[in-house]
Image: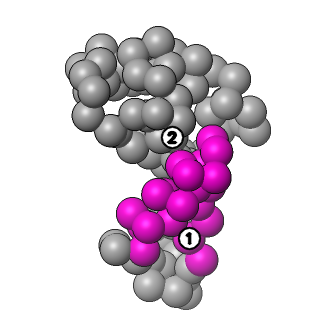
């Protein structure tokens, strides 16, 4: 929660469109029920704020599956956020 509040306090709040990406492994519903309400206090979700999610899938010790051959799973809090998240990661992976 401290990290989410830091993002809300320092990276949000103006009228510039912002995509916040969460890359972690946590319980289902955390993005929608915990993270989004905090971020939405600074910018309007769906207007200037998009929230995307991608679970961490890299196993640093795994010699068979790595960044180049593991499927990157992405989603978003709404369809626009999901599309932006997929576009962002497609530029990297």
Q: Residue at x 56, y 79 (%)?
A: 70
- Residue hosting label 1: 72
| Label 1 close to label 2 by CB (< 8 Å) | no
Position of residue 33 relative to residue 74, above or below, is: above
Circle 2 residues within 10 Å: few <14, some 14–19, many ≥20? many
Task: Give the residue at mark 2.
Answer: 51
Residue 53 falls within the magenta-colored stretch: no
Q: Which quarter of the rendered picture does the C terminus lie within? A: bottom left
x and y, in percent, of residue 91 in the image? 34, 74
- Asked whether residue 6 is in view, the answer is no
Stretch in magenta: 71-90
Residue under the point 41% across and 40% down: 20
Horizontally, residue 67 falls left or right of residue 10, namely right
Mark 1 and mark 2 lie on one chain; the one further toward the N terminus is: 2
> In the structure shown, which secondary structural element does the residue marked by tag 1 occupy?
loop
Mark nearer the viewer, 1 or 2: 2
**Residue 61 shown left or right of residue 12 in the figure:** right
Label 1, label 2: how far apart the Cα atoms are: 17 Å
Classified by dominant secondary structure, the portion drawn in magenta counts as helix
Give the image location of residue 38, x and y in percent: 51, 16
Q: Is 80 part of what is drawn in magenta?
A: yes
Q: Foreground residue, 53 or 18? A: 18
Towards the viewer: 71 or 49: 49
Label total for image? 2
Which numbered circle lies on residue 12?
A: none
């Amino acid at each position: 929660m401290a990290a989410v509040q830091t993002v809300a306090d320092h990276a949000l709040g103006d009228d510039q469109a912002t995509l916040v990406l969460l890359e972690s492994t946590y319980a289902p519903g955390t993005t929608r029920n915990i993270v989004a309400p905090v971020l939405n206090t600074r910018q309007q979700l769906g207007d200037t704020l998009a929230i995307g999610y991608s679970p961490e899938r890299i196993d640093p010790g795994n010699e068979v599956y790595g960044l180049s051959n593991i499927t990157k799973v992405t989603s978003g809090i709404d369809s626009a956020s999901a599309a932006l998240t997929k576009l962002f990661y497609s530029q990297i992976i």
